[in-house]
Image (cartoon, helix red, strand yellow):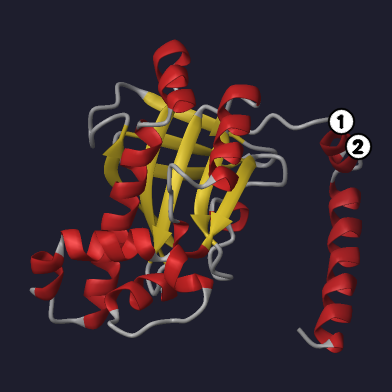
Amino acid sequence: MDQDTFVYALSSNNAWAGYKAHQNPSFFPKLASGQAPQILWLGCSDSRCPETTILGLQPGDVFVHRNIANIISGTDINTSAVIEYAVAHLKVKHVILCGHSACGGAAAALSDSRVGGVLDTWLTPLKAVRYAHADELAAIKDDKARAVRIAELNVKAGVTVLLSNAVVQEAIRDRGLEVHGCLFDIGSGRIRDLGVGTKARGARGGDEIVRGKHGQLVFSGSNVSMAIR
């Protein structure tokens, strides 16, 4: 990021803060008093996937952890610490693991070439997903479709790890925590429920509403919709 871009970012922040304060004078004082997010978002570091923006929510609504290719590993203490804090201490109601289309990590995992450095080590779990589903992936001739499919399989593998986490298991048993696997389509801006997690697709009884500062997400069956308040 060059200096001009950095200066612009600071200027943009100043304008945003002024607008939010004018729109709602209590917004920042209330935000500073504490957080009570209902969602833990586990996603990719890709700059095109800013979770609060694509969910249509506001600061304070979503607790977040992002890494390259949204890989969930039981031995990654960074991810594990985020999950434990969000689930055991913040008491989030939903854990959303979300992959996305056009993922560079997915493309790297599908390639036989090395990326170099620590990135090859980091992508090892995604490489393992590739080899576990080698026949299925090889049968997909379109490169973009193959990348989307491995992204879906990566989310499903990550959800399996989440459901094996002791803190997550306790929260599911004791207070009905829900775990969801989703995929964000960058080309359309839409999030698709992959039907994996604590409840199978279509098995949800009734609607679940997650309220934010200026909007709300409504989980209904396998669908997620947003309403502005």
Q: Quadrant of the C terminus?
A: top right
Up the image or down, 115 lies above or below 208; here it is: below
Crowd class of label 2 (few under 14; some 14 to 19; many from 20; radius 10 Å) = few
Distance from disc 2 to disc 1, alpha carbons, whole Å, reads 6 Å
The residue nearer to you, when weighing 142 against 65, is 65
Taking 105 as reference, is 163 above or below it? above
Residue located 90% across and 49% down the image: 21
Where is residue 100 drawn, in percent x and y? 40, 63
Residue type at mark 1 is Ser
Front position in the image: 113 or 4: 113
Q: Which mark is residue 29?
A: 2
How many numbered discs? 2
**Residue at 46% of width from left, 57% of height from top?**
70
| Quadrant housing residue 5 | bottom right
Residue 209 seen by the camera: yes
Q: Assign a secondary structure to mark 1.
A: loop
Residue 34 to residue 50: above or below: above
Q: Which of the 4 image quarters holds residue 84? A: top right
Provide the secondary structure element on which disc 2 rests: helix
Q: Which mark is residue 42?
A: none
Residue 79 x/y as whole percent: 55, 45
Residue 215 x/y as whole percent: 61, 41
- The quarter of the image holding the N terminus is bottom right
In the image, farthest residue toward the top: 174
Q: Amino acid at mark 2?
A: Pro
Label 1 packing within 10 angstroms: few (<14), some (14-19), many (20+): few
Q: Nearer the viewer, mark 2 or mark 1?
A: 1
Q: Is residue 193 visible?
A: no
Disc on res. 33: 1
Task: Verify CB contact (< 8 Å) between mark 2 and mark 1.
Answer: yes
Q: Residue at x 86, y 86 (%)?
A: 3
Residue at 33% over, 72% down: 109
